[in-house]
Amino acid sequence: MIARTWHGATRVEHAEAYLDHLYRTGVAAYQGAPGSLGVVALRRIVDDRAEFLFVTLWESASAVPRGARDPLPDQSRLLVESDDQPSDYEIVLQLGQV
């Protein structure tokens, strides 16, 4: 199983707009993709920034869609910081339901 992570930050006043954008352009596409095991979006507020960690879970590295490394459309207008590329992790231990 593979967990793909991506980190980005917005100004706190753009947090809800970015979450909506993330859902419409990323989560919705991955939700029904073959090999997709789930999606988690995490957010924390630090001072005047909203930091997001987006995690998608996949059956295998080959199940990750080809375009999944591409930046989400039109996200740069909301972001003040972001990873250049997502990172892939092999899930080596899982306890409980994720």
Image (cartoon, rainbow, N blue to C red):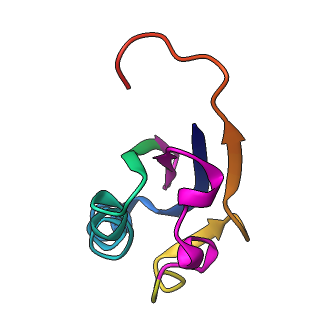
Q: Is residue 84 left or right of residue 17?
A: right
**Which part of the image, by quadrant, shows the N terminus?**
top right
Q: Position of residue 14 (x, y in %)?
A: 36, 68
Residue at x-position 26% and y-position 68% = 20
- Quadrant housing residue 45: top left
Q: Magenta span has 56?
A: yes
Q: Nearer the viewer, residue 24 or 12?
A: 24
Q: Position of residue 82 (x, y in %)?
A: 65, 66
Residue at x-position 55% and y-position 61% = 64
Q: Position of residue 95 (x, y in %)?
A: 48, 10
Q: Is residue 31 left or right of residue 40?
A: left
- Residue most extreme to the top: 95
**Which part of the image, by quadrant, shows the C terminus?**
top left
Q: Position of residue 33 (x, y in %)?
A: 35, 63
Q: Which residues are magenta?
A: 45-72
Q: Magenta span has 30?
A: no
Q: Is residue 67 left or right of residue 81?
A: left
